[in-house]
Image (cartoon, coloured by chain):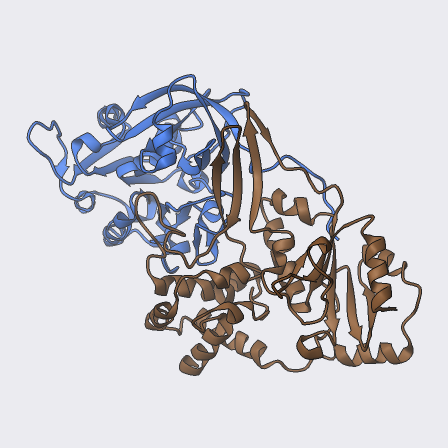
Amino acid sequence: MKTLTAGQLEQLLAVLSTSWELRLTILLPDGTRVIGSPDDGPLALQGGAVSGKPTAAFFPQLGTVFASSEGELREPKAPERPLFVLGFTPRDLACLRFIDRFFADGWRDDIYFRQRDGAVVAGLSGYCGPGGSLIRPAGGNCDLEFFRDGSNWLVIPYSEAGIEIAAKVADFASPEARERFRQASVQLPDENETLLLRASELLRANRVPDYFWSEIGDRCIACTGCNLACPTCTCFGVQDWRSTRQVERSRMWDSCQLDGFMREAGGHNPLGSEGERSRRRIHHKLAADPEKWGEISCFLCGRCDAVCPTGIGIVAVMKELVARYE
Amino acid sequence: MIDTPRHNSLYLPIECEIISVIDLTSGEKLFRVRRSDGVPLSHLPGQFVQVSLLGWGEAPISVASSPTREGFFELGVRRAGTLTGAMHTLKAGDTFGIRGPFGRPFDLPRLQGQDLLLISGGCGLAPMRSLIQYCEDRPAEFGMITILYGARNPADRLFKDELAAWERSARFACSFAVDSISGGDCFSGSVGLITALIPPLHCIPDRTVAVVVGPPAMYRAVIDELHKKGLSSDRIVVSLERQMRCGVGKCGHCTIEHLYCCQDGPVFWLNEIEHLRGAI
């Protein structure tokens, strides 16, 4: 375990920028913290989870599939340098681990792995949450972790790439700093995690009636903010853009909260009501994914609850669901 | 850090050349196609391809011919949207792209040795035709084969010449129905719903498998009739239509609860999906 001052961390990032394309937690001019290029804003590691989908670093909102002109199909090139991404909280890292599995399973999604292969992912934890609150360490799911300890950062490597980067840091952490990290790593009971399991059990036991979803659906304005912010939402549409010189096929995030999401050319729509669509959003994470992947695919990052204008993010819905049907 | 070897994108279409185009109805055409590189499609009955038209996108289309008919494959395409509308303007010699074949095919090993009850409605006959042709070409592998087909009216029936040939064939017992008939129509089958064709059938439930492919509205009524004939859900096969955008289980548009229709289906045994919401 190594230690860095804030200034030394910036120096380390400058060194890393010669080998990797950096994606860091930065502050945009409008005041939002996002994972982006350091050219677009100053480093802003403190404040907790960034707004927006952090997994967009590897699964961007809009991505080229190929371009075609004069009978030739051209795939976008892989990045010249692999990505170094710093800004995932431990919950975000769990989301990334989940979508890594998703995109690798069966047909391996080469468009996702064009960005993901070779990338180094660094987690953020420690006393860098909102207002300096503690974010418990991830303890894995990443190449290395940066843990905020007072005004310093502890560097904890997990993978070979992480060990290689940590070797560039000169100073070792003091025994006291190591002890503070150990104490912060003790996992305490989390009320929402318990709630998540209870809601999942109710859904899997089919104990939630349709009228509950109709009520939730009535409150949905189909803004799609939940899907667009969710780190484990991976649905996309495919479209062609025609210009005079070429056709570009791209894929873009899609939302199961839209009426046309599943509508077929013949008119049949398996998700034909707001209630069905609201059920799909929650049920898929809490019941369908556990069936397919063996784990719930909501890791309680809180983004859907933060962005939903009508208060039906996943935590809000599962609280209501457990209160009514358990 | 994840590190794996690179390969060609699974999202790149492969060029195909149209050998011929035939009008099936006023709104449906049959495209006979081969890969431009001469490589066989290597599909199995029940699979689909993602048809790719540059500038128009992609759409999932069932393969309508059997792999036993070599040198080409066929796609029955209803003009339903912009991509299929553009496809209807293509002619012999034109090219377009495909990806695939994708999806789980009909479970031929479990169908072999069984009497087959092949029930299709509307353009569900296109994917069913791949199985019917397979049975035609491998007659020794199956027991008695009954073909039921329903359409809106006589003119809307697909593959009219083949329907007549199957009706004449000693290999098949055929019954056809249309929802309505008007003056001048030449049609010797029943007028009414396809479900009415099931009760008169003689079938031995423990050696019969029913295969159902049709519009979504058809499934429940047909399955009810099959259950009345004593066929259990593990002897009923359905092929489901969904809006697949990728064909490889990633885009999320074809999920049925935890299943992905493009990969876990489109062909399912009924007992695998009848308990899943929205499946049929």
The percent position of residue B211, horizontal first and vertical second, equals 33, 43
Of residues B120 and A203, the one drawn nearer to the viewer in this rendering: A203
| Residue B28 location (% of width, % of height) | 29, 30
Q: Residue A269 vs residue A310: left or right?
A: left
Identify the residue shown where x is 59% and y is 68%: A299
Residue B46 seen in render = no
User: In percent of the image, x 33 and y 52: which residue is there?
Assistant: A269
Q: Where, quadrant-wise, is the N terminus of chain A in this rendering? A: bottom right
Residue B133, relative to residue A324: is it above or below?
Answer: above
Quarter of the image with the C terminus of chain A in it: bottom left
According to the rendering, which colour does chain A have? brown
Placement of B258 over or under A310, stated as above or below: above
Q: Residue at x 44, y 79 (%)?
A: A320
Q: Would you place residue A224 above or below residue B100 in this image?
A: below
- Whether B142 is drawn above or below A100: the answer is above
Q: Confirm whether residue B162 shows in the render.
A: yes
Q: Quadrant of residue B27?
A: top left
Q: Nearer the viewer, residue B279 or B274?
A: B279
Instruction: Pinpoint residue A290: horizontal percent, then vertical percent.
Output: 53, 64
Q: Is residue A129 left or right of residue A301?
A: right
Q: Is residue B127 left or right of residue A311?
A: left
Q: Colour of chain B?
A: blue
Q: Nearer the viewer, residue A281 or B192?
A: A281
The image quarter in which residue A176 lies: bottom right
Q: Write the residue at 37% across / 30% down.
A: B86
Q: Position of residue A22 (x, y in %)?
A: 74, 53
